[in-house]
């Protein structure tokens, strides 16, 4: 970060990096990367097979955790609240950590890249051709049409709530990219060819915690523009398209602001979730909540048993009553169904049972802080309004 010596504030961010009044830093991209070259389709397919094995193993070994970053942020703010006039000023100074075992899309993409780097010896140039890419989610038709004529994102209006991992490649002198989306639990690489021909990936089935909701995606370059990939998503409920939207990936340059922008942004999301993945198109166990306030927030737990997915809801406030006594030894168990769910989630995510309970207790305790939640919700609403306008 660059310090502006003429700025009276204590922020380490310069005005050119994070303009005053903007809720997030300006995103940054690096220089274009070279391609990894496959000499034949057989060579390409061999790579895809190996990459898929690595991807599935990585998904199974790493839970998706969008709870811990909120806890760490909230605790730090409570500890340092007296030094800041409001939450927004603290948010500007806060450096989001990336802790193994507690990743969102940013950490998961980085972890997967480290695993795939092992294939460099068989595919020279792979590491140089592999990088994180930015994803601008749920754009309207006007925004999509505007980007179809551009080579670069419009930095001033980019929110970038999501990142994926990208490999720039060439097979038989035809160009494209291979995308990996561990943040949305996708268990297969997605190949996007500039000409849209084989081995271009067709419809991809996504993962959801709710078995009544199905997600299907397609990925395509804009015609005559290889700078952006369009990502179309259809959500289907009870056989009917419930929601359809487009997102946009900038794939020609690596995204350098995953932590500063995307991870920081995710702290404010109302949806908090901890998800176990197994590399397939379903999610074995986890929990999620839309954090409103202590009394109105329900936590939904789910896990599979004998091929059937079980769902249980509990008020967030319940976990205040689960706190141990002052010695930290006698846990107050009240609900057998929730205890069973937590045991399943502990096994699935690799997070021990005690830590899981403390995660839920910590969120409940933060939700007790009405001023904290009010500031977060107001900031979240203002951020959405800023970027929508």
Image (cartoon, helix red, strand yellow):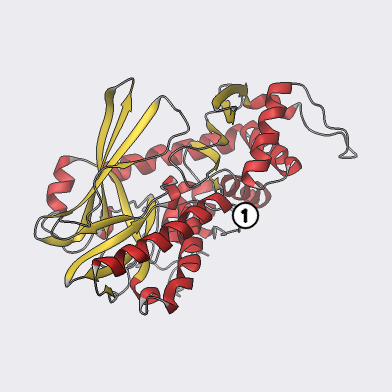
Q: Quick one: 113 or 86, which is closer to the camera?
A: 113
The residue most toward the right is 327
Residue 93, given in percent of the width and then of the height, sits at: 53, 59
Q: Quick one: 358 or 13, which is closer to the camera?
A: 358
Placement of 8 over or under 143, stated as above or below: below
Q: Is residue 37 left or right of residue 66?
A: left
Placement of 84 over or under 367, stated as above or below: below
Residue drawn at x 59%, y 27% as measured from the top left: 306
Residue 132 in sight here: no
Residue drawn at x 64%, y 51% as measured from the top left: 76
- Tell me the SS state at disc 1: helix
Tally the marks: 1
Residue drawn at x 52%, y 34% as measured from the top left: 374
Please give the residue where the numbered disc 1 appears in the rendered image: 83
Q: Quick one: 273 or 129, which is closer to the camera?
A: 129
Q: Is residue 147 left or right of residue 266?
A: left
Q: Is residue 47 left or right of residue 294?
A: left
Q: Quick one: 255 or 93, which is closer to the camera?
A: 255
From the image, which quarter does the C terminus lie in?
top left
Residue 298, given in percent of the width and then of the height, sits at: 57, 24
Q: Is residue 388 left or right of residue 212?
A: left
Placement of 35 over or under 167, stated as above or below: below
Residue 50, given in percent of the width and then of the height, sits at: 42, 63
Q: Residues within 10 Å of mark 1 (few under 14, many from 20)?
A: few
Residue 150 sits in quarter: bottom left
Residue 294 in sight here: yes
Residue 119, given in percent of the width and then of the height, sits at: 44, 72
Placement of 365 over or under 76, stated as above or below: above
Residue drawn at x 72%, y 37% as measured from the top left: 357
């Amino acid at each position: 970060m660059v310090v502006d010596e003429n700025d009276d504030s204590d922020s380490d961010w310069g005005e050119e990096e994070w303009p005053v009044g903007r809720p997030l830093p300006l995103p940054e991209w690096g220089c274009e990367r070279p391609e990894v070259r496959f000499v034949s389709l057989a060579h390409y397919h061999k790579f895809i097979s190996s990459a898929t094995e690595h991807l599935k193993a990585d998904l199974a070994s790493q839970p998706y955790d969008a709870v811990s970053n909120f806890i760490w942020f909230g605790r730090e703010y409570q500890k340092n609240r007296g030094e800041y006039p409001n939450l927004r000023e603290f948010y500007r100074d806060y450096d989001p950590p990336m802790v193994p075992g507690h990743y969102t899309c940013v950490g998961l993409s980085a972890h997967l890249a480290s695993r795939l780097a092992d294939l460099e010896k068989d595919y020279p140039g792979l590491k140089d051709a592999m990088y994180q890419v930015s994803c601008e989610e749920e754009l309207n038709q006007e925004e999509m049409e505007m980007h179809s004529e551009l080579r670069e994102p419009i930095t001033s209006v980019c929110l970038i709530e999501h990142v994926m991992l990208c490999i720039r490649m060439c097979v038989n002198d035809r160009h494209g990219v291979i995308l990996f989306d561990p943040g949305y639990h996708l268990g297969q690489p997605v190949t996007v060819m500039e000409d849209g021909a084989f081995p271009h990936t067709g419809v991809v089935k996504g993962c959801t915690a709710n078995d009544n909701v199905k997600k299907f995606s397609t990925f395509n370059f804009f015609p005559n523009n290889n700078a952006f990939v369009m990502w179309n998503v259809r959500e289907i409920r009870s056989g009917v398209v419930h929601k359809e939207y487009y997102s946009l990936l900038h794939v020609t340059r690596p995204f350098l602001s995953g932590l500063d922008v995307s991870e920081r942004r995710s702290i404010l999301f109302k949806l908090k979730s901890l998800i176990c993945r197994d590399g397939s198109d379903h999610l074995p166990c986890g929990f999620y909540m839309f954090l409103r306030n202590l009394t109105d927030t329900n936590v939904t737990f789910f896990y599979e048993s004998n091929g059937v997915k079980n769902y249980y809801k509990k008020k967030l406030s319940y976990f205040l009553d689960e706190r141990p006594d002052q010695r930290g030894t006698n846990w107050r168990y009240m609900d057998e169904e929730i205890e069973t769910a937590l045991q399943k989630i502990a096994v699935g995510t690799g997070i021990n049972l005690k830590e899981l309970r403390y995660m839920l207790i910590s969120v409940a305790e933060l939700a007790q802080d009405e001023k904290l939640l009010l500031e977060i919700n107001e900031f979240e609403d203002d951020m959405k309004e800023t970027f929508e306008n």
